[in-house]
Amino acid sequence: FGVGTVSSYLGHYFFTYRTGGSHLRLGTRYLVVTLGLVGMGVVLHHLALLVGATPKVAALFVTVAYPPLSFGLNHFWAFARGAGGNAK
């Protein structure tokens, strides 16, 4: 998980958003988003199971919810223009 998170962050930092902001600030925001989404995935999965969904349907629900939330939070908050202090 750690290696994947760091490589994903660096990919977003250098390629997706091409920012020059502070690693401390942007990395912290990225970690908050990542850990928050992991927690959200666990909660959504359990809630889906509680309302009677099969494990496959619960996993599908999380799989559909995760990408747009990840994009939105990373694009509009974690790597938003000005978020790193000196973003290009």
Image: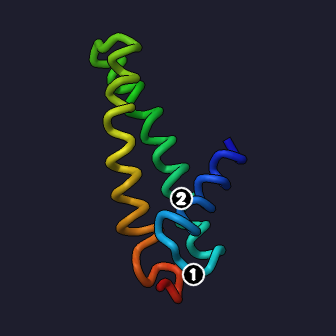
Please tell me whether mark 2 or mark 1 is closer to you in this view: 1
Residue 25 in the image: above or below residue 30: below
Asked if residue 48 is positioned above or below residue 73 in the image, the reply reads above
**Mark 2 neighbour class, 10 Å CA radius: few under 14, some 14 to 19, many 20 or more:** some
At a point 35% along the width and 26% down the height, the residue shown is: 47
Q: What's the residue type where badge 1 is placed?
A: Gly
Picture coordinates of residue 62 (x, y %)? 37, 32
Residue type pointed to by label 2: Val
Badge number at residue 74: none
Closest to the observer, 18 or 26: 18
What colouring does the structure picture have? Answer: rainbow
Q: Which residue is mark 2?
A: 32
> In which quadrant of the rendered view does residue 77 lie?
bottom left
Q: What x and y, as percent, mark residue 84?
A: 53, 80
Residue 80 position, x and y percent, is 41, 74
- Quarter of the image for residue 45 reads top left
Q: Is residue 35 above or below residue 73?
A: above
Q: Earlier in the sequence, mark 2 or mark 1?
A: 1
Q: Position of residue 42 (x, y in %)?
A: 47, 32
Residue 20 image label: 1
Q: Is residue 69 above or below residue 29?
A: above
Q: Secondary structure at mark 1?
A: loop
Seen at 35% across and 24% down, the residue is 60
Q: Is residue 5 left or right of residue 54?
A: right
- Give the residue furthest to the left: 51
Image point (35%, 10%), residue name:
54
Rendering quarter of residue 73: bottom left
